Amino acid sequence: MKKLSLSLTSKIFVSLVLGIITGLVLHPMKGNAFVETYLINFLFSFLGSGFMRAIRMIVVPLVFCSLTVGAAGIEDVRKLGRVGVKILAFYLGTTAVAITLALGLGNIINPGKGIVLSDIVASKVSVGESKPFVDILLGMIPVNPVEAMTKGDMLQIIVFAILCGVGISLLGDRVKTIKKGIEEANNLMLKLVELIMKLAPYGVYGLIAKTFTTLGYAAMLPLLKYFLGVIAALIIHYLITYQGLLVLVARYNPIKFVKKYASTMVVAFSTSSSNATIPTSLKAMQENFGVSKSISSFTIPLGSTINMDGTAIMQGMATVFIAQAYGVELTMGNYITVIFTATLASIGTAGVPGVGLIMLGMVLTEIGLPLDGIALIMGIDRLLDMLRTVVNVTGDAVCTLIVAKTESEIVEVEEDSFGSVEAESL
């Protein structure tokens, strides 16, 4: 008899469902001594808190290594000059727009209202006081990088990692040993993420079971609002930001764009990996759109590392959701911090499935919110991950077309047998 083997995603989803069922069954017995002592405060807490501590363990070294490697890999920007500036401006600019959109929409639909997670967490939840904008900027510069890593000051860690990466890029072969060491450390961190994620089904079960045992049915509607809120933000960003830039700057027909890039979108949706779409995306840009290799070979691989607009949208909506669930009022300074953190972090976010949740932990840590709320969204994150990866790779393609258009690096391609239109700009 063939043994049934479930993927990690399936296991997490099953754990989510089992956790909800367990919680709803035990909710009427919430005051029972056995349920409170041995299930809620021991079994569920051990499984859930143990998993979250493992995530906290990996956040700082992962952020430092991935951002350093990401920044060190942008050495071609110096060679491409103004092209590199255009690419970086597009990717970082649209990421900032994406997370701002998510934060704004989150405050309109209020996905976390109606659920009180502070009843589940013993420690008091609070965020730092609002700071003047200049203090936020100055606070990004680490006086002591080691202390920043010890305290988990994410903005300072991000800035230091980016500076290290730029320094490695400028020094080139003179620090090739250090560069190789950081790359190997980054590979190690990604492997640890993979190992920790194997514990996710148990952690999700413990955290969800504890949540629903304590709250009952009250936790279901906010979760649905969060899910629909992320999808709405992704659609708005795709239609308004990307298609608007495509028409206004690249002078390209959005319908033609979708026809020519649909196969890459399918790969992105099915794999949830920006890196996995690089071969098909390069092929589409060069053969379907007529973009030169000199442009597409730079923008597409770089975009798989830097352009994480879909992930930024998830982080923004999740931040609002979790803050509201814990009854925390975020200040304008907190929102600015989230925008800066998520935008800068996008430079080194690995284009592989699941890393977005780890980076969300970094954003929550920066503004002082508990990571336990991540468990509520983890079970449905795979579907959202598939959708936001489509948005990510679409951004890579739009950026490529814009840069190619402004640099006159688009050539005509003939119609194929299906009647696809030419790749020339409108």
Image (cartoon, rainbow, N blue to C red):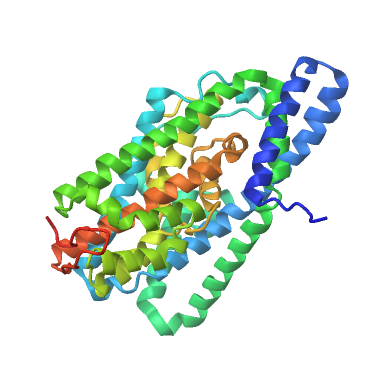
Where residue 20 appears, as percent x and y from the top left, is: 69, 29
Q: Residue at coordinates 76% horizontally, 21% vertically from top-left? A: 25
Q: Residue at coordinates 21% horizontally, 71% vertically from top-left? A: 81
- Number of on-image labels: 0
Where residue 421 appears, as percent x and y from the top left, is: 19, 58
Where residue 174 appears, as percent x and y from the top left, is: 43, 84
Q: Residue at coordinates 32% horizontally, 56% vertically from top-left? A: 261
Vertical position of residue 349 compared to residue 254: above or below: below
Q: As drawn, which residue projects farthest toward the front?
A: 417
Q: Quadrant of the C terminus?
A: bottom left
Where residue 32 appears, as percent x and y from the top left, is: 84, 17
Q: Is residue 376 left or right of residue 307?
A: right
Vertical position of residue 342 compared to residue 417: above or below: above
Q: Determine if residue 307 is in view.
A: no
Q: Is residue 65 left or right of residue 218?
A: left
Q: As drawn, which residue projects farthest toward the right?
A: 34
Q: Quadrant of the N terminus?
A: bottom right
Q: Nearer the viewer, residue 415 or 70?
A: 415
Q: Nearer the viewer, residue 358 or 201?
A: 201
Vertical position of residue 308 compared to residue 106: above or below: below
